[in-house]
Amino acid sequence: MAKRSITALLVAAVLLLIPSCDAESFLRGFGANVLGGIDSEETVNQINDMVEQGITNYDELVTQVVKASRNPDTEKKLIDTLSQEASEQAVSTIERTVNDLSGQLDQIDASSLPAEVQSVADEAISAVKKIAGTEGDYNPTKGDVAIIQAAMSLVEMFQDSGIGQNGSPSSAEIEQLISTANSALRMFNTIKSSTAFRNIDLNPVIDALIASANQSSGEEVQA
């Protein structure tokens, strides 16, 4: 049970985290002339096909979404597509995962989280339950399917890597986690508005995680 709860927490963390604005986000305002043209239709169709058929190549999904985010017109087409109601086939690829996750999240004590993060965590948990169909009448979108599948893939990658299994992650392992998560988090940032997570304010989470990381680093040095 403890292992399942840890998995649920990891998923919640992946769904909550998002990077701050970077230079590329600034350059996106200048359009394709700066960032290079891409085939909007082909990119959006590839992402849509991956969502509908079940994401088997996580890295390719991240690559295509990040690619789409580099052009405002393509990003809009992607969001419009992912905002559509997901087909029964697409929903079936996450149904068991979402139902299991919804039950696991019920067992998490939000009061153990930093105060500024608790409300955000509650909203994220509520979004998962909405997708699972346990809170209100909600039809999952293609974006919901993409974000849940991607989150679980990322969790599996972290678990398979063995990071932190011998205690607290080392500095090298933390750098690896950040490198692995960076593109994924940019992907979540791009498609979030097409999902049940659209209204979540992530700034308190980022601030709390940075503070926690700095504290942990200081403790390791003292030890």
Image (cartoon, grey):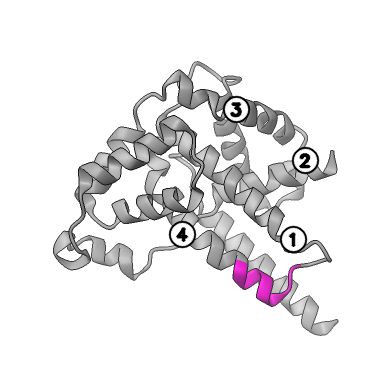
* Residue carrying label 1: 162
Q: Amino acid at mark 1?
A: Gly
Percent of width and height locating residue 206? 55, 60
For this orientation, the residue located farthest to the top is: 137
Rendering quarter of residue 31: bottom left
Crowding near pointer 1: few (<14 within 10 Å), some, many (20+)? few
Left or right of 202 in this view: 187: left
Among numbered discs 1 and 3, the one appearing first in the sequence:
3
Mark 1 secondary-structure assignment = loop
Range of magenta residues = 169-176
Alpha-carbon neighbours of circle 3 within 10 Å: few (<14), some, or many (≥20)? many
- Residue 10 location, x and y as percent? 67, 49
Q: Residue furthest left?
A: 33
4 and 2 marks in contact (CB < 8 Å)? no
Nearest the viewer among 32 and 210 is: 32
Q: Earlier in the sequence, mark 4 or mark 1?
A: 1
Give the image location of residue 3, x and y in percent: 81, 45
Looking at the rendered structure, the secondary structure element under dot 2 is helix
Kindly identify which residue carries mark 2. Answer: 4
Which image quarter is the N terminus in? top right
Foreground mark, 4 or 3, reads 4
**Which amino acid does the dot numbered 4 rest on?**
Ser
Which label is found at residue 100?
none
Residue at left offset 20%, top offset 50%: 39
The residue indicated by pointer 4 is: 183
Would you call the spot at circle 2 few (<14 residues within 10 Å), some (14-19), or many (20 or more)? few
| Circle 4 Cα neighbour tier, 10 Å, few/some/many (<14 / 14–19 / ≥20) | some
- The Cα atoms of the two marked residues, 4 and 1, are separated by 20 Å
Magenta-drawn stretch, dominant element (helix, strand or loop): helix
